Image (tube, rainbow, N blue to C red):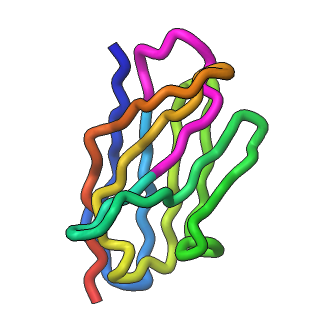
Amino acid sequence: QVQLVESGGGLVQAGGSLRLSCAASGIRFSVTRMGWYRQAPGKQRELVANIATGGTTNYADSVKGRFIISRDTAKNAVYLQMNSLKPEDTAVYLCNVDRVLFSPVDYWGQGIQVTVSS
C-alpha cells in the first residue's frame, strides 16, 4: 500500500520559514518525480514545485526565489524549504508522486496545514 506522509507544517509569522518533509513508502519501483501542491480555502489546488530524478525542478511563479525543493532519492523523500513566507502562502500542502519509472501515477499524501500570520 502506497503511503505519503507529510510533516513540518504549522503556524509562522510573515517573513518566517518552514521546512516540509514527505516520505513515500510502498512504492515498488523507482520514483521519478515528486512534488508539492497546495490548496487554499475556496481555491483550486495548484502546483508549488516538483523535482525529477536528475534534479530538474519546476516552481510556481509565486514561490520562485523563496521556496526550494529537494529530494533524497534513496529514501523516496522530498522536502520543501519555504522562506520569506507570506500570508498568501497559507494553505494545505500536499505531497504528490506523479511518475514512477516511465509511468504516470497519482499518489497523494493527506496534506499538512501551513498558516502564515500577518
Q: Which quarter of the image is occupied by the N terminus?
A: top left
Q: Which residues are magenta?
A: 24-36
Choose between 46 and 92: the one closer to the eye: 46
* Picture quadrant where residue 2 is located: top left
Image quadrant assignment for residue 5: top left
Left or right: residue 75 compared with residue 37: right
Quadrant of residue 88 in the image? bottom left
Residue 81, x across and y down, in percent: 52, 60
Q: Quadrant of the C terminus?
A: bottom left
Q: Main secondary structure of the magenta part?
A: strand
Relative depth, front residue between 118 and 40: 40
Q: Is residue 89 left or right of residue 77?
A: left
Nearer to the camera, 101 or 68: 101
Relative vertical location of residue 31 with respect to residue 37 in this rendering, above or below = above
Residue that appears at 64% across and 45% down? 51
Locate residue 19 relative to residue 118 in the image: left or right: right
Q: Position of residue 52 (x, y in %)?
A: 68, 39
Taking the magenta stretch, the answer to whether it contains residue 25 is yes
With respect to residue 12, does 78 lie above or below? above
Q: Is residue 18 magenta?
A: no
Q: Residue at x 66, y 20 (%)?
A: 101
Residue at point 21%, 68% (across, down):
41
- Residue 65 picture location, percent across and down: 64, 74
